[in-house]
């Protein structure tokens, strides 16, 4: 048994491992090449998060999905570079919006250089992703643009909040489908499509990626509350401090509204107060970690991961299918 990719994913076939490792190495080289500029400072800022590492979750999915066709097809690695560049660009922007201090265990770009440089660097990465994408053909451009529209729409809906009368949890899950599910789905779609896999396989893997992406983000929601900075690579409770309504908090609010338990109402009041105070923030984290809402969010993570796994059923059995199924287990494991 060998280990490759995020979360210690095990790959049980030497040929598959070699393909994945070779592909990921090529993606890494492609990321460094795509983030170079004639201006040294832009190169430094653009490579800041590339060099910080990361799970390379999306490129790994491209490589695994490509196993259902020709994994050596010329469009596979560039498409993985495109999705990872797009993801990295969103991180620069997210950290500005969230006023985050740490990303991937290092200072966030906005902390190091300020908000303006962070936003513009994210824009630079989007531009470089588009440049690479243009060589993959008009269909790839259309798919990526539709996914990017969904991603931005999800971010806007998160910022605007649910409309009057809309269940906040349902609204939030729709947000995640756009913000995270869309790009993970495209990762699987590009891998299968660029490898020349059958259209039915492309569709199955796209739907798998959509559900896995939501599960992945829900696991992040749990980690924001439950982990320390060593596990998550960012400051615990960042979303909580910034008032971002992640799933554990939404479940807490629903429980408080439905049952009116004093301890729930007090915790909601604490969260709605000034969490810029470190003591109040630490107390809110402590109470949320012990609250049933966190376990409810874990169960939702498992449900989406199991839906993703179920999508794989029609695919031919093999090591690639087994690895994709194990990704579901790995995502759930992150959430504890």
Image (tube, rainbow, N blue to C red):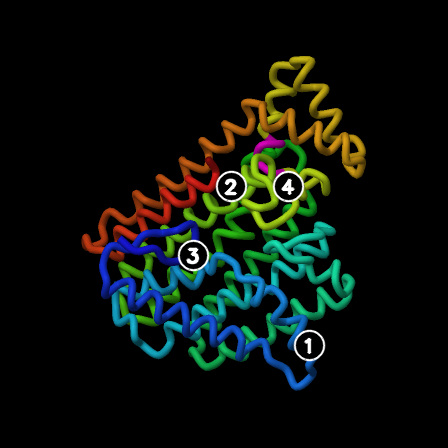
What secondary structure is the magenta-colored segment mainly? helix
Residue 42: x and y in percent read: 68, 76
Q: Nearer the viewer, residue 37 or 76?
A: 37
Compared with 247, 132 (above or below) is below
Residue at image mark 3: 185
**Proximity of marks 4 and 3: CB atoms separated by less than 8 Å:** no
Q: From the image, state whether disc 2 or disc 4 is nearer to you.
A: 4
Nearer-the-camera pick, 165 or 8: 8
- Identify the residue position indicated by label 4 in the image: 236
Taking 99 as reference, is 10 left or right? Answer: left
Regarding mark 3 in the picture, which secondary structure is present there? helix
CA gap between label 2 and label 3 equals 16 Å
Q: Is residue 165 above or below residue 177?
A: above
Residue 42, label in figure: 1
Residue 139, percent from left and from top: 42, 73
Over which residues does the magenta segment extend?
A: 246-250
First in sequence: mark 2 vs mark 3: 3
**Labels 2 & 1 near each other (Cβ < 8 A):** no
Q: Give the quarter of the image for residue 127.
A: bottom right
Residue 52 screen position, x and y as percent? 58, 62
Residue at (48%, 70%) from the top-left corner? 142
């Amino acid at each position: 048994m060998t280990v490759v990719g995020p979360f210690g994913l095990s790959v049980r076939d030497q040929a598959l491992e070699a393909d994945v490792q070779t592909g990921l190495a090529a993606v890494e080289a492609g990321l460094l090449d795509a983030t170079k500029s004639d201006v040294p400072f832009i190169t430094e800022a653009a490579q800041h998060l590339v060099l910080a590492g990361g799970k390379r979750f999306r490129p790994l999915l491209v490589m695994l999905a490509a196993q259902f066709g020709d994994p050596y097809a010329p469009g596979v690695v560039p498409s993985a570079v495109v999705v990872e560049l797009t993801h990295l660009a969103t991180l620069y922007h997210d950290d500005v919006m969230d006023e985050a201090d740490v990303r991937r265990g290092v200072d966030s770009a906005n902390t190091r250089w300020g908000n303006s440089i962070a936003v513009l660097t994210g824009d630079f990465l989007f531009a470089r992703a588009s440049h690479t994408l243009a060589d993959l053909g008009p269909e790839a451009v259309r798919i990526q643009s539709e996914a990017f529209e969904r991603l931005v729409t999800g971010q806007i809906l998160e910022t605007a909040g649910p409309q009057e009368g809309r269940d906040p949890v349902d609204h939030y899950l729709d947000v995640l489908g756009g913000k995270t599910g869309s790009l993970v789905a495209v990762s699987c779609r590009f891998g299968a499509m660029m490898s020349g896999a059958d259209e039915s396989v492309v569709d199955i893997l796209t739907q798998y990626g959509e559900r896995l992406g939501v599960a992945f983000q829900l696991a992040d929601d749990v980690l924001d509350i439950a982990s320390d900075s060593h596990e998550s690579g960012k400051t615990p409770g960042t979303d909580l401090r910034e008032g971002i309504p992640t799933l554990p908090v939404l479940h807490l609010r629903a429980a408080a509204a439905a049952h009116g338990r004093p301890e729930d109402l007090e915790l909601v009041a604490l969260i709605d107060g000034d969490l810029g105070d470190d003591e109040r923030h630490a107390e809110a984290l402590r109470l949320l970690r012990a609250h049933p809402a966190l376990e409810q969010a874990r169960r939702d993570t498992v449900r989406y991961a199991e839906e993703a796994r179920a999508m794989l059923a029609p695919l031919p059995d093999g090591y690639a299918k087994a690895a994709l199924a194990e990704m579901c287990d790995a995502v759930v494991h992150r959430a504890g």
